[in-house]
Amino acid sequence: MTRVRPTWPDLPAAIRTAIEDRLGAKVTSWVSHDGGYSPGLASVLTTERGQVFVKTASPDQTEALRLHRNEAVKAARLPATLPSPAFLWSLEVPDDGGVAGPDAPTWAVLAFEPVHGRAVRTDPWDLDDVDLLARLALEIGEHPAPDGGVFLDAADKPRPDAQALADERPQGLATYDPWLAAHVDLIAQVASPERQAEASGGDRLVHADFRADNVLVLGPDDRPRGVVVDWPHAARGAAFLDLVGMLPAMHALGGPAPQEVLDRTPLPRGTEPEAVATQVAVLTAYFVYGSLQEPPPGIPHLRQFQRVQAEACIAWLRELLP
């Protein structure tokens, strides 16, 4: 998803000053990265001391602000061996540039090592890049989740969306494949809290928002490597979650169907088919329920993206359930 983000001159003077003070140098040029879903600045800033990737969220961008603060805590604890840009620092800057008080509206500012890579080839999808994404998703799951309580257990936070769909039967269900409304009770059963806990439990690191637009590809075409960005949702759980989680978005945006990808890059050894079905049911309900809500402030196109992923999930779930 492409959006036009604010650039360096668009930031309030007080915020620019705080960033330059932290950098210890004046910003002389910038390159904006206009993909993604958050509404704030996301730019590589250049100073006489070098380059840094900086992203911001303002006080009125409430959802982006929450996610940036989550990422600041988690990115600082990611394993050094992870294929991810190094986290450098974060700032909380009062809206007026003064001293932060307990009730003062503040900006969140995050800084990372800049990564100069290309986007995953998705127009059309390149099968080598599909394979790279799948291997990268599994590589994340090879890392134990860091200790310290920051990375919550996926098994401890079951998603309620499937039961909510069964209980509420929102009118918007009728805008989807009729199979969904006819099987909403079965989906709630497959995605029950008990089955979610069993399916998603584990001690592996999970990105939990792994998609092509959160990956940059580095190196020559004959030896490419991927780098994963944007970690606010990172959690602890089963090693297969990121690979399964990326497949609906890939298919929704014109890529191969989930089973085609899994035929090329199998799930981790020991992954149970029932666990996969439960996770796909969870994703289906999450995207369907989310797509029927009002858009969050500053991210008006999120609901449409959730809808196309929901449609891909429904098609996959129909293959997995009796």
Image (tube, rainbow, N blue to C red):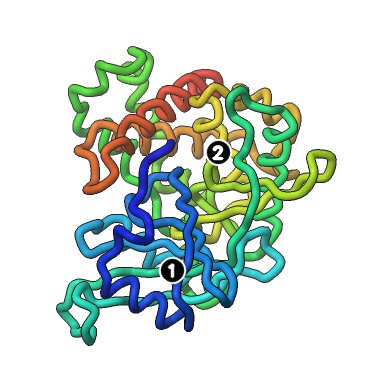
- Name the residue rendered at 53%, 66% in the picture: 46
Q: Front-most of 94 and 180?
A: 94
Q: Front-most of 91 and 164?
A: 91
Q: Percent position (x, y) of residue 310? A: 40, 28
Tag 1 and tag 2, C-beta contact below 8 Å: no
Is residue 309 left or right of 257 when viewed as pictured? left
Q: In the drawing, what numbered circle is on residue 246?
A: 2
Q: Quadrant of the N terminus?
A: top left
- The amino acid on which the numbered mark 2 sits, given as a three-letter code, is Met
- Name the residue rendered at 55%, 24% in the picture: 320
Q: Percent position (x, y) of residue 114? A: 59, 62
Question: Disc 1 and disc 2: Cα gap in Å?
Answer: 25 Å
Q: Is residue 263 visible?
A: yes
- Is label 1 in a helix, a strand or a loop? strand
Could you say which quadrant of the image residue 143 lies in?
bottom right
Q: In the drawing, what numbered circle is on residue 110?
A: 1
Against 53, residue 36 (above or below) is above
Q: Residues within 10 Å of mark 1 (few under 14, many from 20)?
A: many
Q: In the image as oriented, which residue stretches furthest toward the right?
A: 222
Between circles 1 and 2, the one closer to the viewer is 1
Q: Front-most of 59 and 3?
A: 3
Q: Residues within 10 Å of mark 2 (few under 14, many from 20)?
A: many
- Is label 2 in a helix, a strand or a loop? helix
Is residue 104 left or right of 87 when viewed as pictured? left
Q: Earlier in the sequence, mark 1 or mark 2?
A: 1
- Name the residue rendered at 39%, 34% in the picture: 189
Q: Is residue 199 visible?
A: no
Against 77, residue 141 (above or below) is above
Q: Front-most of 294 and 126?
A: 126
Is residue 82 left or right of 108 when viewed as pictured? right
- The amino acid on which the numbered mark 1 sits, given as a three-letter code, is Leu
* Numbered-mark total: 2
